[in-house]
Image: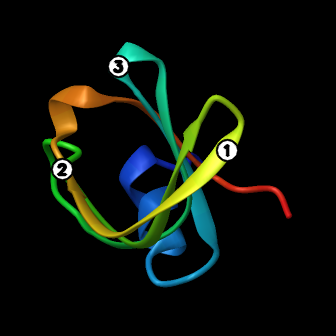
Amino acid sequence: MTRRPLEILDKALNQKPVIVSLKGGREIRGGILQGYDVHMNLVLDNAEEDIDGVAEKRGTLIVRGDNVIYISPSVE
């Protein structure tokens, strides 16, 4: 059975943290995916941005889909 990208994101909703790589070398880790749309705009809760190896808490974020390179379930 072929799995589609949006089906995989549906399974990640309100579950385990995700890793989001953004343009400009930025990375969001540990955020719980609360929602998304077909443009890959994301709503993340309890997000942390990895800056030079140091995690800075960002809380709830809305990430514009144009900036997303990839999104992946985190490995813990």
The residues bearing labels 3 and 1 have C-alpha atoms spaced at a distance of: 18 Å
Q: Is residue 33 above or below residue 14?
A: above
Q: Secondary structure at mark 1?
A: strand
Image depth: mark 3 or mark 1 in front: 1
Amino acid on which the number 2 mark rests in the picture: Asn
Q: Residue at x 61, y 68 (%)?
A: 17
Q: Secondary structure at mark 3?
A: helix
Amino acid on which the number 1 mark rests in the picture: Val
Q: Please tell me how crowded label 1 is: few (under 14), some (14-19), or many (20+) other residues with Cα within 10 Å.
A: few
Give the mark, 3 or 1, whose residue is nearer the N terminus.
3
Mark 2 sits on what residue? 41
Pick out the residue farthest to the top. Answer: 24
Badges 1 and 2: C-beta atoms under 8 Å apart? no
Q: Is residue 56 above or below residue 40?
A: below
Mark 3 sits on what residue? 23
Drawn side of residue 28 relative to residue 41, left or right: right
Q: Is residue 4 above or below residue 34?
A: above
Give the mark, 2 or 3, whose residue is nearer the N terminus.
3
Q: Position of residue 54 (x, y in %)?
A: 67, 44
Q: Please tell me how crowded label 3 is: few (under 14), some (14-19), or many (20+) other residues with Cα within 10 Å.
A: few
Quarter of the image that includes the C terminus: bottom right
Q: Quadrant of residue 18?
A: bottom right
Mark 1 sits on what residue? 54
Drawn side of residue 44 relative to residue 4, left or right: left
Q: Position of residue 57 (x, y in %)?
A: 49, 64
Q: Residue at x 13, y 42 (%)?
A: 39
Amino acid on which the number 3 mark rests in the picture: Lys
The residues bearing labels 1 and 2 have C-alpha atoms spaced at a distance of: 25 Å
